[in-house]
Image (spheres, rainbow, N blue to C red):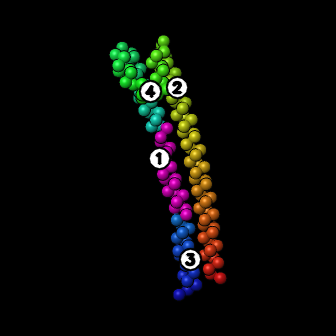
Amino acid sequence: MNERNSSGFGIWAGFLVACFAVVALIGAFATYAVALPHERWAIREQALQTAEHLIRTNAPATELAALRPGLATAAAALDAPDPLAALQVARAESRTLSLREVAAIQTRIRILLAIATLMAAGFGIVILRIAGSGRR
């Protein structure tokens, strides 16, 4: 048996690979978070469009009242003197909020990946030192 196999180098190399595999998995799972602001925006936008359609067609108040939960903070637009104009303002605010959410999530994901990569590198260094000390 050679010296390389007797020190368990293969096991330590496997641990090192696992360190960086964890970073890759974190990145893969983080990609799901990136889509959340767009999905929220699409739901808000659909509710705003439905409310606008109901106002234009003079739908009963009960139908508009059913939309209030989906409109969230834009629900106040239904009580405004000019609800169509208020809904346009709410739509612009919804876009702005979505862009801010995207920027915040992107920043958090970058920080998460940077920390995980540094931790994996540190763990890898420890593993390589342990593996190297066993060869002496």
Look at 46% across and 35% down and name the residue there: 40
Q: Quadrant of residue 118?
A: bottom right
Marks 3 and 4, Cα distance to the nearest angstrom? 59 Å
Q: Quadrant of residue 107?
A: top right
Look at 48% across and 12% down and name the residue there: 81
What is the chief secondary structure element of the magenta stretch?
Answer: helix
| N-term mark: 2 or 4 | 4
- Judge whether residue 96 can be spotted in this image: yes
Q: Which residue is mark 2?
A: 92
Depicted 94 relative to depicted 3: above or below? above
Depicted 17 relative to depicted 114: above or below? below
| N-term mark: 2 or 1 | 1
| N-term mark: 3 or 1 | 3
Q: Which residue is mark 3?
A: 9
Residue 60, percent from left and from top: 34, 16
Look at 49% across and 56% down and name the residue there: 25
Q: Which residue is mark 4?
A: 71
Marks 3 and 1, Cα distance to the nearest angstrom? 36 Å
- Judge whether residue 45 can be spotted in this image: no
**Which stretch did the figure color magenta?**
19-37
Depicted 96 relative to depicted 89: above or below? below
Residue 114, percent from left and from top: 61, 53
Residue 28, percent from left and from top: 49, 53
Q: What kind of element bears circle 4?
A: helix
Residue type, numbered disc 2: Ala
| Residue 32 highlighted magenta (yes or no) | yes
